[in-house]
Image (cartoon, grey):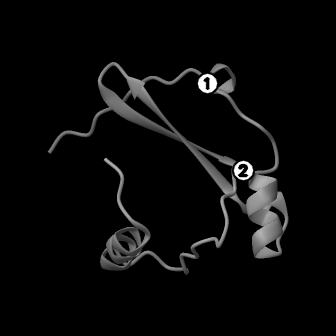
Amino acid sequence: MAIGFSEFSRVLKSLDVAGQVKELPESAPTAAAAAGQLGCEAGAIANSLIFNADGDPLLVMTSGRGSRSAGSAPPVTPRRSRP
């Protein structure tokens, strides 16, 4: 399910997440492209990859400094919190 920029910003604010969300004026298919638009180094950009892990979403976040793929993610043992 995709949500828009405004909704994403609202959700983060409701969760008391510090910082500012910026919408880029142009597409940024790489961390280097995003960094160029923001005037920062690629390492300051977070890349996120979402995988289907046996029906559950698995979020992997990495620094924009290097490239990542599904094959480079370390093995993960799922841990579920219980209410």
Give the camera-side residue of 81 and 5: 5
Quadrant holding the C terminus? top left
Corner quadrant of residue 58: top left
Q: Which structural element holds mark 2? A: strand
Q: Which residue is mark 1?
A: 70
Q: Residue at x 40, y 26 (%)?
A: 52
In the rendered image, residue 71, in percent from the top left (x then y), is placed at: 66, 19
Answer above or below: position of 31 versus 81: below
Quarter of the figure with residue 17? bottom left
Disc sitting over residue 46 in the figure: none
> What residue do we see at 37% from left, 34% from top?
57
Residue at the far front in the pictured view: 26
Q: Which residue is farthest left?
A: 83
- What's the residue type where badge 1 is placed? Ala
Reading the image, the residue beneath label 2 is 63
In the depicted view, which residue is nearer to us: 63 or 76? 63
- Given contact means CB atoms under 8 Å apart, are the residues at marks 2 and 1 in contact? no
Q: Is residue 4 left or right of residue 38?
A: left
Task: Name the residue at 39% across, 75% down.
Answer: 6
Give the mark count.
Answer: 2
Residue 46 image point, x, y percent: 65, 55
Circle 2 Cα neighbour tier, 10 Å, few/some/many (<14 / 14–19 / ≥20)? some
Please provide percent x and percent y for residue 28.
69, 57
Closer mark to the observer between disc 2 and disc 1: 1
Cα gap from disc 2 to disc 1, whole angstroms: 15 Å
Q: Could you say whether the residue bearing mark 1 is in a helix, strand or loop? A: helix
Q: For this view, does 40 lie left or right of residue 7?
A: right
Q: Please determine whether, in this image, residue 2 is positioned above or below residue 68.
A: below
Q: Earlier in the sequence, mark 2 or mark 1?
A: 2
Among the 4 quarters of the image, the one containing residue 33: bottom right
Of 23 and 80, the residue lying toward us? 23
